[in-house]
Amino acid sequence: MNNTTDMTKGSPVRLILAFGTPLLFGNILQQLYNFVDTVVVGRSLGMNALAAVGTTGSINFLVLGFVMGMAQGVSILVSQYFGAKDEKKLRRSITMSAYLNVAVGILTTIIATWASRSMLQWMNTPAEILDMAVEYIHIIFLGTLVSLAYNFFSGILRALGDARNPLIAMIIAFLINTVLDVWFVAGLQIGVAGAAYATVMAQGVSAVYCFVCLKRIELLHFEREDWKVDGRLFKRSLTLSLPVAVMNSITAVGVMVLQTAINGFGALYVAGYTAASKVIIILEQVSSTFGFAASTYVGQNMGALEIGRIRQGVRQINVAVLLMNAACALIMIVFGKTLMRLMVSESEPDVVLVGYHCLVFLSCFLVALGVLWVHRCSLQSMGDTFYPMLSGMLEFVSRIFFVWMLPRFFEFDGVLASEVSAWISAGLFLVIVFRYRIGHIEVQEQKMENA
């Protein structure tokens, strides 16, 4: 069944919201997917096993974030060629991106697996959980190609305007992961390896589902000629993908720095921030999801040379995301303490208060994160991945600078403010760049029309 959507016609904000809403449900479900792993491991294997899985989060994000960034390049090309109605280049962009991603995936698997123990030791992972952490992350990294395949195939579907099937794939993965987690960890009792196997196998099934969906799309019926090496398209895929991958990895390092600063305030603040972050990461899906939805819209209209529609659509979705994030902040102010009490034992009232404070502080600035995501994804889909990569570096530098300076004056609030300052600085930079780039393109178009 063909679920592609042409976003070069119709109301921009309606198209983006209709496309983004299923993606939002899927992304929230993915966060619950990770939550299930935590619950099953924690309840079945105990504190050390839970800590072993948890301590791998940063390097997992560092490595798989890079791989996911490489896979994102194909969605930029596909959305542009789909908008331009150039089916031949669309197919060839997929094959060239496939060559690139397989090569990167194999190399990343080898390096990450080999270096995983050293990275965990560098992060001062406690000796009593080190072996379990290595066992878990080895299996995750050996499944890198599986994760890459899911992100590659689902990225193509989204670029073609299909939000329904990636959502179904995520629902399937969530259900399979939940069942296998319980069976492998609690039933067969194969330890943290069971949780890792469940994750990789669930992603594998979702990748197969997305691949089957792609096979049903008529314009993706590949011929032998589509697989011939095209140096220009291969280079363009690399040029678009690599900056996104680097940006993701830089962001991961920034998160590690922030966590280090929080650790310095002791267990109470670590526990409160951890509880709040479980909620904040779900709220952040509004910004990231509609940013990605905007990227499909922008990519298709860029391919169709509908520059006016790009400006209109970005402006409208910015307003919509701002209103949604403002609503999220209001809900957290009213109900945030209740949420913290659901997650934290009644015997730990101080943790509830710290968690609620973090929740309110960060949620009130989600509007800045929305601006950041919409403009970053829009620029990427216009084919400009260099400035978004610079914004990632600016975000990283801002986070480090402010986390070094602000806690001296504002203590723990200074750490929270450093995160917010990184969002604001990167967001403002991207707004300026987007307005310059869209204006430059419009001037170039005008010159061509007058020539």
Image (cartoon, rainbow, N blue to C red):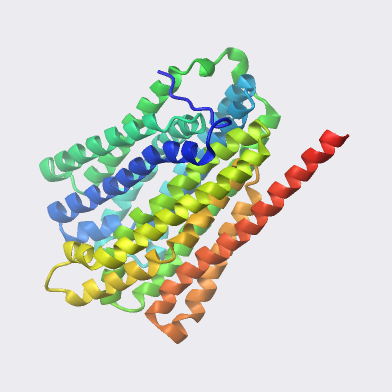
Which residue sits furthest right?
Answer: 451
Where does the C terminus fall, quadrant-wise? Answer: top right
Which residue sits furthest top?
Answer: 223
Count of numbered circles in the view: 0
Q: Residue 80 sits in which quadrant? A: top right
Left or right position of 370 against 332: right
Question: Could you tell me if residue 206 is visible in this image?
Answer: yes
The front one of 262 and 300 is 300
Q: At 67% across and 36% down in the image, what residue appears?
A: 235
Query: Where residue 155 sits in the image (x, y, percent)?
Result: 47, 35
Left or right position of 281 against 81: left
Query: Where residue 272 sits in the image (x, y, percent)?
Result: 27, 70
Q: Residue 109 sits in which quadrant? A: top left
Q: Is residue 316 positioned above or below 126 on the image?
A: above
Where does the N terminus fall, quadrant-wise? Answer: top left
Left or right position of 290 against 88: left
The front one of 356 and 227 is 356
Which residue sits furthest front?
Answer: 11
Q: Is residue 290 positioned above or below 427 on the image?
A: above
Q: At 34% across and 53% down in the image, what residue appears?
A: 282
Query: Where residue 348 sits in the image (x, y, percent)?
Result: 16, 74
The front one of 431 and 168 is 431
Q: At 22% across and 57% down in the image, what residue appears?
A: 50
Question: Could you tell me if residue 70 is visible in this image?
Answer: no
Q: At 23% across and 53% down in the image, what residue appears?
A: 38
Query: Where residue 140 sits in the image (x, y, percent)?
Result: 35, 44
